[in-house]
Each structure stands twice: as structure tokens, then as C-alpha cells.
Image (spheres, rainbow, N blue to C red):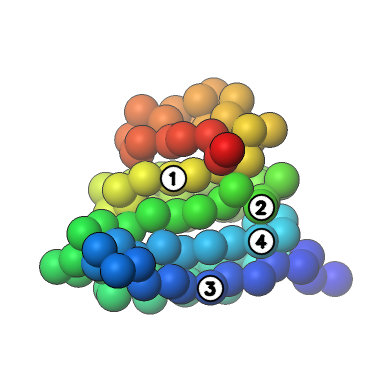
């Protein structure tokens, strides 16, 4: 059974593209997440950058970490739920992209 995940791409007035995810990212929906990240990356070209907003995501598995790691060079900032900060530190993702805890 697929895990619930909602994905939206938002364009800020300053040109920043924000991919907003809500739910959980795991093997059942990582392909949807990957496609949305690809689309957001394409829309951010020439703009002010890409923010991946995972503030409302409380669970990611290794598949999600792999997708984010593969695109780390294209993500300006990764905003994550405070519960996930340790996972992004341990995985090494925080060394590849700026990771900020959600407020």
C-alpha cells in the first residue's frame, strides 16, 4: 500500500522554486518524489535557486536519502522536520547540501 505523500511546486516572488512535500517518503512513493524534484529543478534553472521543503515530512527511508543525495548539487537549501536532522547528518547529506531545521 502506498504511503501518503503530497507534492507541490511553489514559485516565490524572488524567483526561488520551492518543492513542498507533506507526508512520508519511502520506497512506495519515492518515484513520485524523484519526478517532482526533477520538475522543480528544471523550473529553478536560471532562477534564484531550489528549496526542498520537507518540514511536514516526519519519515524518510534510504530511497529518499539516495534521491536527495543524487540531486544535492541542484538543491540550494533543504528544510527538514527537526526529527530528521540526525538522519541527514548521519547519512552525510548535510555535507552535500545546506540542511536547515524547520521552524
**Residue at the location (46% across, 35% down)?**
100
Q: Tell me if label 4 and label 1 are in contact, CB under 8 Å.
A: no
For marks 4 and 1 on the same chain, the one whose residue lies earlier in the sequence: 4
The location of residue 25, given as percent across then percent down, is 66, 57
Left or right: where does residue 2 sit relative to residue 5? Answer: right
C-alpha gap between disc 2 and disc 3: 12 Å
Q: Secondary structure at mark 3?
A: strand
Q: Which mark is residue 56?
A: 2
| Residues tagged 4 and 2 counted as in contact (Cβ below 8 A) | yes
The residue where tag 4 is placed is 22
Residue sitting at the far left: 46
Figure label count:
4
Placement of 99 over or under 48, stated as above or below: above
Q: CA distance from mark 1 to mark 2?
A: 12 Å
Question: Distance of mark 4 from mark 1, alpha carbons?
Answer: 14 Å
Residue with the mark numbered 3: 8
Amino acid at each position: 500500500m502506498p504511503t501518503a505523500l503530497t507534492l507541490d511546486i511553489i514559485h516565490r516572488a524572488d524567483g526561488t522554486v520551492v518543492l513542498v512535500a507533506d507526508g512520508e517518503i519511502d520506497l512506495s512513493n519515492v518515484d513520485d518524489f524523484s519526478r517532482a524534484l526533477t520538475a522543480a529543478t528544471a523550473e529553478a534553472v536560471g532562477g534564484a535557486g531550489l528549496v526542498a521543503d520537507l518540514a511536514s515530512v516526519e519519515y524518510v527511508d534510504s530511497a529518499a536519502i539516495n534521491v536527495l543525495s543524487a540531486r544535492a548539487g541542484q538543491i540550494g537549501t533543504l528544510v527538514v522536520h527537526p526529527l530528521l536532522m540526525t538522519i541527514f547528518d548521519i547519512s552525510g547529506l548535510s555535507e552535500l547540501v545546506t540542511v536547515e531545521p524547520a521552524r
